[in-house]
Image (tube, helix red, strand yellow):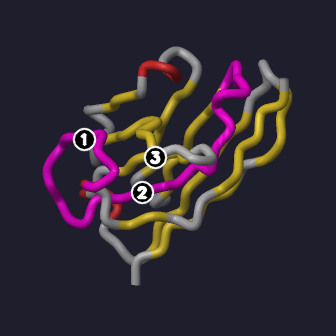
Amino acid sequence: QVQLVESGGGLVQAGGSLRLSCAAFGLTFNNRTMGWFRQAPGKDHEMVATISPTGGSIYYTISVKGRFTVSRDNAKNTMSLQMNSLKPEDTAVYYCTARGTDYGDDAPGSPTQYTYWGQGTQVTVSS
């Protein structure tokens, strides 16, 4: 059974930093594209960052480029999202996701292409 477990969310002031972590269980982590998505109240799921199995392909949504950094450790089956210079508009529930199988070293941005989702972790940025 696949499980994705997020941690690291919380409340932070604008300009602050948070680091989210995702631990993956029950899948072959080193051949899976992983992603961070978020959902703000009343809005659809939005891609934040995606990373291919080798880390060779990484994509960010424009609004977080230069502020967020995604990384993965295939030896530990973990993925992280370092979030700096946080803004109130970053407030959302953040989800760790994984593709359903090995699709090669690409990192698509559509939430429909990710089969497995964690329970989500709340990030709240106050102004």
Q: In whole angstroms, how far apart are the C-alphas of marks 1 and 3?
A: 17 Å
The answer to which image quadrant residue 68 occupies is: top right
Residue type, label 3: Asp
Q: Residues within 10 Å of mark 3 (few under 14, many from 20)?
A: few
Q: Residues within 10 Å of mark 1 (few under 14, many from 20)?
A: many
Identify the residue at horizontal 57%, vertical 67% (top origin): 119
Q: Give x and y (percent) for residue 96.
A: 49, 55
SS at mark 1 in the image: loop
The answer to which of marks 1 and 2 sits earlier in the sequence is: 2
Q: Give x and y (percent) for residue 30.
A: 31, 57
The residue labelled by disc 1 is 108
| Residue 43 shown left or right of residue 9 in the figure | left
Q: In whole angstroms, how far apart are the C-alphas of marks 3 and 2?
A: 15 Å
Q: Quadrant of the N terminus?
A: bottom left
Identify the residue at horizontal 37%, vertical 40% (top origin): 50
The residue labelled by disc 2 is 97
The answer to which image quadrant residue 75 occupies is: bottom left
The magenta span reads: 84-112
Q: Give x and y (percent) for residue 120.
A: 60, 59
SS at mark 2 in the image: strand
Identify the residue at horizontal 31%, vertical 65% (top origin): 115
Q: Was residue 89 drawn as part of the magenta stretch in this picture?
A: yes
The residue labelled by disc 3 is 44
On screen, 3 above or below 21?
below
Identify the residue at horizontal 18%, vertical 43% (top origin): 105
> Which residue occupies the foreground of this view, 73 or 15?
15
On screen, 63 above or below 5?
above
Picture disc at residue 37: none
Residue type, label 1: Pro
| Residue 10 shown left or right of residue 47 in the figure | right
Q: Was residue 69 drawn as part of the magenta stretch in this picture?
A: no
SS at mark 3 in the image: loop
